[in-house]
């Protein structure tokens, strides 16, 4: 059985790539819902509908034992309902994991008390990072900034505008004296170097492509009942719900290699 990694688009490819580096033996399937991108501007019900279809496909057709919802927006809009309603009725022995709680646990472990978060409109509006943070450590402050221009700029290669857009997005967070910045969207990992140049040196960047692979490794060690069901042929497939020439280019840019993309209509 496989490990599924799912995102609204291409950003999760970076997380999938790093997971494979960390855990190369397993079999993977990546699903990018490029047909419905961006999730960050849609309603909760709509995002849930997309996510349920995708996880159902990944479990039924792709035979995944565990799915990482690498998309923050999908984690906020759909994860709890998938775990509490969908999974127990359809696949009680399989697992769906998200990205929000592991990121906050990492911030807590790193003893960062003043956090910034950049994310999509949906993520910021959902307040999910604040809600989960109250359970983990109510003393940690979090300052959020919705950064809706970043995903389109990344997906459609708007490199020449990114620095100035980033600067104006970061300014209010820097003024709040943040000591850590959570990149609350899979796509933002690709901006890590630019962000490091624009942020004060004492701000730690918390990026999912570095943190999620470690958290998954830890999870699999603690859950042999899941780990022993995973097959180990070192295989991966990349599936998208829509493929355009710009997605092909963007995926190569993100992965720094040619990958075979397959279109799947759900
Ligand atoms: N991948 C999504 C996330 O991590 C953002 C992109 C989108 O809006 O679909 O939140």
Image (spheres, grey):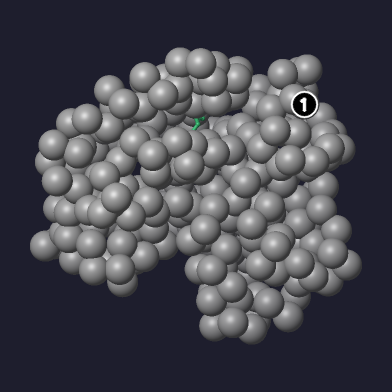
Q: Is residue 44 above or below residue 103?
A: above
Q: Quadrant of residue 148?
A: top left
- Asked whether mark 1 and ligand 1 are closer than 8 Å, the reply comes as no
Q: Residue at x 75, y 75 (%)?
A: 229
The answer to which of 84 and 71 lies nearer the viewer is 71
Q: Position of residue 134 (x, y in %)?
A: 18, 59
Q: Position of residue 248 (x, y in %)?
A: 77, 26
The answer to which of 203 and 125 lies nearer the viewer is 203
Quadrant showing the C terminus: top right
Q: Which residue is mark 1?
A: 248
Q: Quadrant of residue 258?
A: top right
Left or right relative to 258: residue 99: left
The answer to which of 211 and 8 lies nearer the viewer is 211
Around disc 1, counting alpha carbons within 10 Å, would you say few (fewer than 14), some (14 to 19), or many (20 or more)? some
Q: Position of residue 250 (x, y in %)?
A: 69, 28
Q: Residue at x 64, y 57 (%)?
A: 18
Q: Position of residue 120 (x, y in %)?
A: 38, 31
Left or right relative to 195: residue 109: left
Q: Secondary structure at mark 1?
A: helix
Tell me if residue 133 can be seen. Answer: yes
Task: Count every numbered label the image shows and give the total.
Answer: 1
Tell me if residue 92 can be seen. Answer: no
Left or right relative to 9: residue 77: left
Q: Residue at x 84, y 64 (%)?
A: 234
Q: Is residue 152 above or below residue 204?
A: above
The answer to which of 193 and 209 lies nearer the viewer is 193
Quadrant showing the N terminus: bottom right
Q: Residue at x 36, y 27 (%)?
A: 166
Q: Is residue 196 above or below residue 87?
A: above
């Amino acid at each position: 059985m496989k490990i599924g990694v799912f995102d609204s688009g291409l950003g999760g490819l970076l997380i999938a790539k790093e997971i494979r580096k960390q855990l190369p033996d397993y079999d993977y399937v990546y699903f990018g819902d490029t047909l419905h991108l961006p999730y960050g501007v849609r309603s909760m019900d709509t995002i849930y509908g997309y996510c349920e279809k995708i996880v159902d496909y990944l479990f039924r057709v792709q035979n995944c034992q565990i799915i990482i919802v690498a998309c923050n927006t999908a984690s906020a809009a759909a994860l709890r309902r998938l775990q509490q309603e969908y999974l127990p009725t359809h696949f009680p022995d399989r697992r769906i994991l998200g990205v929000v709680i592991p990121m906050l646990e990492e911030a807590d472990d790193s003893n960062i008390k003043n956090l910034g978060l950049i994310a999509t409109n949906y993520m910021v509006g959902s307040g999910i990072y604040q809600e989960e943070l109250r359970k983990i450590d109510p003393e940690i402050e979090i300052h959020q900034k919705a950064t809706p221009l970043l995903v389109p700029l990344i997906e459609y290669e708007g490199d020449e505008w990114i620095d100035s857009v980033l600067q104006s997005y970061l300014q209010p967070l820097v003024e709040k004296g943040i000591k850590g910045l959570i990149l609350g969207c899979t796509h933002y990992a690709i901006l890590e170097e630019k962000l490091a140049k624009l942020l004060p040196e004492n701000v730690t960047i918390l990026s999912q492509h570095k943190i999620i692979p470690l958290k998954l490794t830890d999870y699999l060690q603690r859950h042999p009942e899941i780990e022993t069901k995973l097959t180990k042929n070192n295989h991966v497939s990349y599936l998208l719900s829509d493929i355009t020439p710009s997605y092909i280019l963007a995926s190569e840019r993100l992965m720094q290699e040619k990958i075979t993309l397959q279109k799947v209509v759900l």
